[in-house]
Image: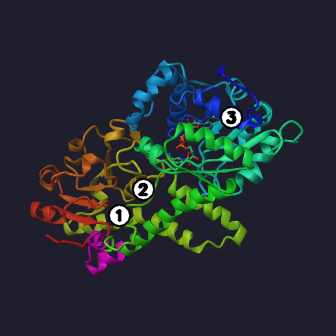
Amino acid sequence: MNNNKIRNILTLEEKDLKELVRTGNISVCVVGVGRIGLPTAISFANSGFSTIGYDINANLVHMINSDDYPLKDEPDFDEMFHKAVQNKKLHATIDDKDAITNSDVIILSLPTPMDKNNIPDYSAIISVGKKLNQLLEQNSLVIVESTVEPGFIENELIPLIEGNGERLKVGRNLGVAACPETANPGQILRDFSVVPRLVGAIDKRTLKIVEEVYRHVFKAEIISLPDCKTANASKLTANVFRDVNIAFVNELAILFEKLGIDILTVLKACDQKYNFEVHYPGAGVGGPCLPVNSYQLLNSGKFLNGKLKLVKAAREINEHMPHHVIELLVDALNEAKKSVNDSTIAILGISYKPNVKDSQLSPAEYIVKELLDLKARVKIYDPFFKGEEAYSLKTENSLIDAISGSDGAILVTAHKEFCDIPPSLLVEKMRTPVMVDSRGVVDTAWAKKAGLVLRGVGREVIRK
Ligand SMILES: NC(=O)c1ccc[n+]([C@@H]2O[C@H](COP(=O)([O-])OP(=O)(O)OC[C@H]3O[C@@H](n4cnc5c(N)ncnc54)[C@H](O)[C@@H]3O)[C@@H](O)[C@H]2O)c1
């Protein structure tokens, strides 16, 4: 239980608030202590606040309370985690009542994925919103760090928390703010200290409290925005900007392959100009953020009769890329006089981005499925998923196990381990030395010299 609850954080005089923040006399509950919520909870705890993580995952709660750090691929937080738990500043619970009623500030770091029809799924936030209606004390503060569409907080979440408005009402005794998280897995600690935080709130009083509290916890600058929906729109705009720009280079990549132009050379040249921002082509855009965020914005497009043409086209291009990778593989196998249907193909990497253990919406899933549909045998190796199961296949324990006897290798994720594989090793170990490098990490000239049949997204085809 959080013992430090001061009650009525919303009604504090400014100097009292400052003093309580300075002395860590505010109790915080982070709802959802996953990839983003746990580092957030650790940061609050190590800033002096008594912090409780509420989560429905009992195993995760047990790990946290046993001082067993769960985010092994986010090593920067390891020591901070142990410090927070051992100092009894951080603990976790599956008891919603205990966590919510005994906290002054409730931070929602709940998943906001999409369903199989690409419609945003806010069910976790909706379910917690209903609980808040029952459990939240008056004059407490709710901060939504999850990524949601602009307007979701105002139009859907607040009415749920307020219920009939007799007990809880924004403007009277309920503070609600948005601080959509923008940190990048694998570098969350760095991002917490340098990437400005976007904050919007339902009223000025709430905004001031969030600014005060966050300024105490995070080094990064705070960008105060007029309201929650502007904060959420800013988060989505930044991420969808990336999805759209990656789609642009992916489309060019396919064109340049045909024209015999290396896109990496082009991008390097463009990057010399002051107003160009480089994005890289690849096997597709995965993860819990970019694809989902584009669909969240597309869902908001209902206010424009569904007309957000550019974002929609970008999604189509990026979702075509895994299939394009298979086209490159088939082309390379043809050169090696092999057909895909009796080949063994090694998938190198299933994480959606390098050096993290996260395969949500990874292009690897589509690639594996299409290979199996084409009757290829598939081996998977990812240093973060050694010996586990992925897409109903047991993964390999080493790179050598994966490539030995294979007829093709597809580099899907540019994990560190895959960035300097000598092409001669592939030629030595593979039955047919064919590779598709979807991330532009293999040196084409080196590959040719070693006798590797190589194709790459946006790379010039160099025939043996
Ligand atoms: N992972 C990222 O790269 C990233 C980056 C920036 C922002 N975000 C956003 O942050 C939010 C959280 O994402 P995440 O990646 O940390 O998700 P996650 O799945 O890693 O963690 C979410 C946690 O919430 C818990 N949970 C689910 N339903 C719950 C419920 N009803 N009550 C209590 N706990 C519940 C889960 O058990 C899990 O531990 C999402 O909105 C996401 O879009 C994610």
Q: Secondary structure at mark 1?
A: helix
Residues packed near mark 2 inside 10 Å, few (<14), some (14 to 19) or many (20 plus):
many
Q: What secondary structure characterizes most of the magenta part?
A: helix
Q: Earlier in the sequence, mark 3 or mark 1?
A: 3
Q: Is residue 345 magenta?
A: no
User: Which residue is most to the left?
Assistant: 449
Between 349 and 110, the residue placed more toward the observer is 110
Which label was assigned to residue 407?
Answer: none
The amino acid beneath tag 3 is Lys
| Gap between marks 2 and 1 measured at Cα | 10 Å
| Gap between marks 3 and 1 measured at Cα | 60 Å
Q: Quadrant of the C terminus?
A: bottom left
Q: Is residue 100 above or below residue 407?
A: above
Asked whether disc 2 touches disc 1, contact meaning CB atoms under 8 Å apart, the reply is yes
Between 44 and 101, the residue placed more toward the observer is 44
The amino acid beneath tag 2 is Pro
Q: Residue 382: image x %, image y %?
A: 32, 44
Q: Residue at x 38, y 61 (%)?
A: 283
Residue 28: tell me if it is visible. no
Q: Is residue 263 magenta?
A: yes
Q: Which residue is mark 2?
A: 363
Q: Residue 313: image x %, image y %?
A: 53, 72
Q: Which residue is mark 3?
A: 15
Q: Please report the bounds of the magenta region as a residue range.
A: 253-269
Q: Secondary structure at mark 2?
A: helix
Asked whether disc 2 touches disc 3, contact meaning CB atoms under 8 Å apart, the reply is no
Q: Which residue is mark 1?
A: 325
The amino acid beneath tag 1 is Val
